[in-house]
Amino acid sequence: MNEITITDMTAQKAVQQADPRRWVALILILLPTLLISLNNYMMQVALPNMQDSLHASFADAQLIFSGYSLGLAVALILGARLGDLYGRKRMLLIGVLGFTVMSVFGGFVSSPILFIIVRVIQGLSAAMIQPQVLSIIQRTFPPSEKGLVFAIYGAVIGTGFTLGLILGGVLVDWNWFGLGWRLVFWFNVPFGLLVITGLPIVPESRGPGKQSIDWIGTLLLMFGLFLLIYPLTVGQKQGWPSWTWGCVLLSILILLAFIVLQKRKGKEQDTPPLMDLSIFRIRSFRRGVFTEMMIYLSMFSFFFILNYFLQTGLHFNLKTTSLVFLPLGLGLFVTSLLSSRMVNRWGNTVLRSGALIMGISILLLVVSLNTDPIHLFHIHNILILSLYGIGLGMATTPLANMILSSVPAASAGTGSGLFTTMMYLANVLGVAFISILFTHSLGLSLSDASLADYVRAFSITAGASGLLAFMASICLGLKRYRVERT
């Protein structure tokens, strides 16, 4: 770690320890994080009801669901940079305000086209929120408290995952005042207003100086990510037509042009780049991002293929499917809360063991389903899913602290934006990879395949997800990552 970074951290620590309101501020900034997580899973449950109510086509329904993730993923780096330049609390306020207003408006919309626009704007608003939350945590809390704070952050994400599917079904089924799926949107409003009201107590922070934004780089990055993420998001359900791969190839060329431009601007004093690529010179950050991709590729591909197997192979409805994920979510929640103490005692071994447990749990579930694919709610399967959640909490909750702890305070927004962007890219890439492998392994159309075919395809694809988890565990074992201990 260089002298500037040490000075930044020392000064930052002194300011943080003098701020007695940081724990109240943490509650406020984690509320929108919870809402973003809840919203995504509640929408998954409400989408069929919404599609019928709006008389939307299948393509419209796809864009309603994926538009949010698309807007979020393509604008995360921009959101992080805006926070660095113009203030993280300010951008958090703008993001929460946009998300809340769109939640109000979304409850009144009756046009599929308008609904797609609402979801994209909600995603863009979320892109203003996510990097600021991690950056404010980095700047507000001293190293001695960050382990606990990131454990709480992970528990919030686990809560959103656990409750999202269940709460979405409950709100739609209750159908209060005949509002149905509209309650899923209006559920966000009071929490958004609470955050907006309480934000004045959150300390403001920004990067050094106030500079202009590299809009050419911004357009290249956003367009390149759009051409990468959109075809990978919709391609699976459209049978991977040739245009999807053409878009992916074009996106790679555009992103390479973006990297060249950023390197050139990084050498010019008067034209600062959108993204300071020198952050990748930090070895622990570079290795940490690679490990992050491996772990989240494993997690998202496993979630997708398990959900696909339950609904298509076993014909579970969404409510029953959400109950299958419940023990997994509970294991994640509990371990997230305990991860700070575990890391404080055992360090990097916690992450390595978590990834190993993820891989072992997947293999145990594959063996169990090959023995008895019908009775998924047997106690041993519930225990296996709980064990996977425990491993997931051990592997993912300390990741943000491990990766971002080495980033200088001035680059906290860039580091947070990259961390979150890589997570969403892992989601898209994991789903695309595993869906291609599943279709190839099934060898038949979905309607012609038998249960035995589905079990075979699930075993192969889940095994690939488990292999990714084992690879992440090996990477964590080979590399000397530094995890902050209190």
Image (cartoon, helix red, strand yellow):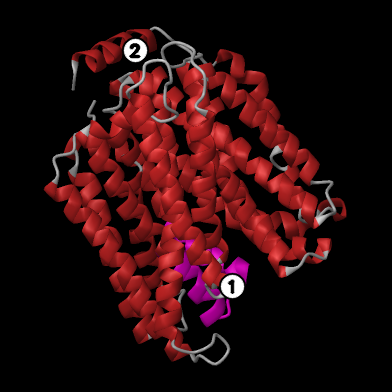
Q: Left or right of 94: which side holds 254?
A: left
Q: Position of residue 307 (x, y in %)?
A: 50, 69
The residue that label 2 is drawn on is 12
Amino acid found under the numbered disc labelled 1: Gln
Q: Is the residue under label 2 in contact with that under label 1 (CB below 8 Å)?
A: no
Name the residue at 46% across, 17% down.
Answer: 22
Name the residue at 50% across, 63% down.
Answer: 246
Quadrant housing the N terminus:
top left
Q: Quadrant of residue 187?
A: top right
Amino acid found under the numbered disc labelled 2: Gln
Quadrant housing the C terminus:
top left
Majority SS type along the magenta span: helix
The residue that label 1 is drawn on is 238
Considering depth in this image, is 219 or 206 the residue closer to the camera? 219
Magenta region, residue range? 302-328
Name the residue at 56% across, 26% down.
Answer: 28
Q: Position of residue 198 (x, y in %)?
A: 62, 19
Q: CA distance from mark 1 to mark 2?
A: 50 Å
Name the residue at 83% across, 54% down.
Answer: 111
Considering depth in this image, is 161 or 12 the residue closer to the camera? 12
